[in-house]
Image (tube, rainbow, N blue to C red):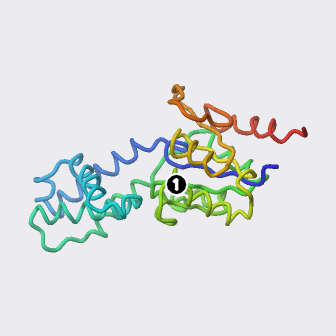
Amino acid sequence: MIKALTFDLDDTLWEVWPVVEHAEQLLYEWLAGHYPRIATRFTSLELRELCDEVAVNQPGIAHDRTRLRKEALQLAAGRAGYAEFDVDAAFAVFFAARNAVKLFAEVRPTLERLARRYPLASLSNGNADVRLIGLDDVFAFSLSAIDVGAAKPEALMFEEACRRLQALPEQIVHVGDDPIHDVQGGLAAGFRTVWLNRAGRDWPGGARADAEISNLAELEAVLAVWEQPR
């Protein structure tokens, strides 16, 4: 019996990289106006790469995209010679644009239909805010790597979802675009998994998802088959 569904967010419900790149450009323009030495010292891409540097030097926060971004901005400000820097104001510029996503066309109507039949939850390694995006009404709750202290494919997020949904792992279907984070992570946690493969990629290897779909609307047919009496 399927009791609940969980969904990845970035690149599952919307395309994330154009959004992130736009958010980084708006942040860069804000920095150029408020802290011009940062924009002189670094390109927008170099500011992003500072997140990787922080993750290497502080592996304990590598799962926390918000803290990584803030620490990278603080590092940039220090290297540009600013003793005082309003990191919260800078991050707010980025975060507002990061959540200005465009849902894939079928996402909202499909989630609304599914939410009438199952509890839905989102499980994300990113820092998207479903309240700002306008999906909080279809999700019973949303979990991120920041919330649980570890990123998929580690088990913690899946285990917390089971606890909150009051369901066994085999009673939950997880849907996501990433073969490792979503499919391998979900399978290892005991979930049934659906690989959302919008681009028609080849499977990279390893244990395959229980089903593969090319857009979210196809999920309903998969669930109908799985719910048939045996």
Tell me which corner region of the image, top left, top right, bottom left or bottom right, holds residue 84: bottom left
Horizontal relation, residue 217 to residue 221: left or right: left
Q: How many marks?
A: 1
Would residue 177 appear left or right of 61 to someone viewing this image? right
Q: Residue furthest right?
A: 229
Which residue is at 68% across, 34% downward?
211
The answer to which of 87 and 170 lies nearer the viewer is: 170
Q: Locate residue 56, reporting x and y percent.
A: 28, 55
For label 1, the crowd category at 10 Å Cα-Cα, with few meaning under 14, some 14 to 19 and many 20 or more, is some
Q: Position of residue 113 (x, y in %)?
A: 74, 47
Residue located 56% across and 56% down the image: 155
Is 36 displayed left or right of 3 in the figure? Answer: left
Q: Nearer the viewer, residue 30 or 150?
A: 150
The spot of residue 4 in percent (x, y) is 73, 54
Q: Secondary structure at mark 1?
A: loop
Q: Which residue is mark 1?
A: 154
For the point 24% across and 62% down, the residue is 73
Q: Is residue 207 above or below residue 30?
A: above
Measuring from the top left, give residue 157's x and y in whole percent. 56, 59
Quarter of the picture containing the C terminus is top right
171 and 199: which is toward the camera: 171
